[in-house]
Amino acid sequence: MKYVSLLGATGSIGTQALQVIKEHPDQFRLCAISAGRNIDLVRKIISDFQPNLVAVLEKEDCERLKAEFPSGIKFTYGKHGLIEAAVHDQADIVLNAVMGSVGLVPTMHAIEAKKTIGLANKETLVTAGHIVMGAAKKFGVDILPVDSEHSAIFQCLQGESRENVSKLIITASGGSFRDLSREELKHVTRQQALKHPNWSMGSKITIDSATMMNKGLEVIEAHWLFHIPYENIEVLLHRESIIHSLVEYKDRSVIAQLGTPDMRIPIQYALTYPDRMKLVTKGLGLAEIGILHFEKMDMDRYRCLKLAYDAGMRGGTMPTVLNAANEVAVEAFLKEQISFLNIEELIEKALERHNVIDQPDLAAIEEVDRETRKHVYTLL
Ligand code: NDP
Ligand code: MG
């Protein structure tokens, strides 16, 4: 029996992780959850899974839940609550599916508590990759990727030596606006941006997919997870989202992982690794699919991808600025305060004015994150 602490239980990844846990009651038990403000869903999760600890964002919600569920469950809230869920005594694995760099501190605490980490929260590795991976090494903790591309690469690397890898090829569906020109992007709306052709996901990552920042964040995430230099990480446009990513080895052999676009597959793999379990989902009918398409990525068309590569290569606090500026800009776009192309402009401005700190510690990263957010708010 594996005990799971699920951070971000009410989100898109969180609810799919709950489906996986529910499918295998003899294998998994949910011991702790964190959520933000979706308290109705928290109530339902409590009834369905009876976790021992529940962390929410607001104190008032915590008090209300305490009154409603008087026995047995510990309720907590805020940043401290998120950390309590991340280090829960019973947890064998902490599945981090919160959105944004708020996931960093709980990840660090979970690593220090020697919990295996299932990581969906890519912003954690983007903002502080060297610190997270350094701590994981120090405490002997596995970081198991949940992001579909990274799960694919992780699967392609099983039994292989890292020294034999010549490059990672990360596939990109292209997001909601893959067929629009930059001119046409000027007038796109929030509603159009939220319609992803292949995946149903949380709103922030859906916008990140439309700007291609999601792929940029994934390049940085891959760099840290697999210790591969940026020069050897390539992005390939692949509309069908069937091949989730590939690894090329030095003998030019290429290994790919394929599957239907269903996040429960990589979520379950992180939970069962190194084993596998049955999952009830549609099999891959390659004969029906017939043809798969691949195109070179256009860095001028997808400026956010270029910004992410540049920030990753420059290193230090640059990716922290990239991520924080992006989080604020996407939130503003979702609130219809700015246009779609304003997102990349704001990120570019934040990166341009930043005096990079090399080898920042956690405190420096938190300060740069805070300062960048403040600056971008003044630009809105
Ligand atoms: P959602 O927006 O659907 O869910 C986010 C979760 O985090 C919710 O449980 C939300 O709570 C909680 N949350 C949000 N803000 C805070 C906060 N300040 N403090 C504590 N909890 C908070 O996101 P997704 O599930 O789509 O994505 C989660 C992570 O996984 C992201 O990093 C994303 O990039 C990554 N990912 C997602 C994929 C997907 O298919 N969705 C694919 C690959 C990676 P509530 O809703 O209760 O307010
Ligand atoms: Mg992905």
Image (spheres, rainbow, N blue to C red):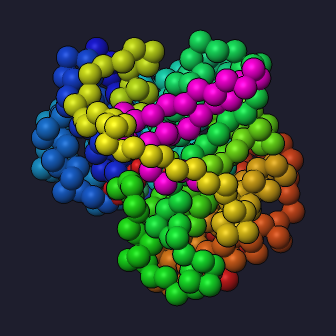
Residue 93 lies, with reference to residue 61, above or below; the image says above
Q: Is 186 covered by the magenta stretch?
A: no
Q: Can residue 374 be seen in this view?
A: no
Residue shown at the point (26%, 18%) measured from the top left? 27
| Image side of residue 104 versus residue 128, left or right | left
What residue appears at the point 71 percent right and 57 percent down from the top-left corner?
308
User: Does the stretch in magenta take in 250?
Assistant: yes
Dividing the image into 4 quarters, which one contains the N terminus? top left
State the residue in front, 195 or 25.
195
Total labels drawn: 0
Q: Residue 163 sits in which quadrant?
A: top right
Which part of the image, by quadrant, shows the C terminus? bottom right
Q: Please give the range of residues in magenta.
A: 237-265
Location of residue 205 with respect to 351 vertically, above or below: above
- Residue 101 spot, x, y in % from top left: 57, 52
| Relative to 30, residue 322 above or below | below
For the residue pair 43 and 243, the one nearer the viewer reads as: 243
Which residue is found at the position 50% from the left and 40% from the top? 244
Q: Is residue 24 found left or right of 350 in the rendered image?
A: left
Task: State the image coordinates of residue 240 (x, y, percent, origin top left).
Answer: 44, 50
- Tell me if residue 243 can be seen: yes
Q: Is residue 43 left or right of residue 187?
A: left
Seen from the viewer's position, the closer of residues 90 and 302 is 302
In the rendered image, residue 133, in percent from the top left (x then y), is placed at 67, 31
From the viewer's perspective, tell me whether residue 188 is left or right of residue 168: left
Residue in the picture at 64% in, 15% down = 160
Q: Where is residue 243 in the image (x, y as percent from the top left)?
A: 49, 39
Tell me where residue 328 sits by quadrant. Answer: bottom right
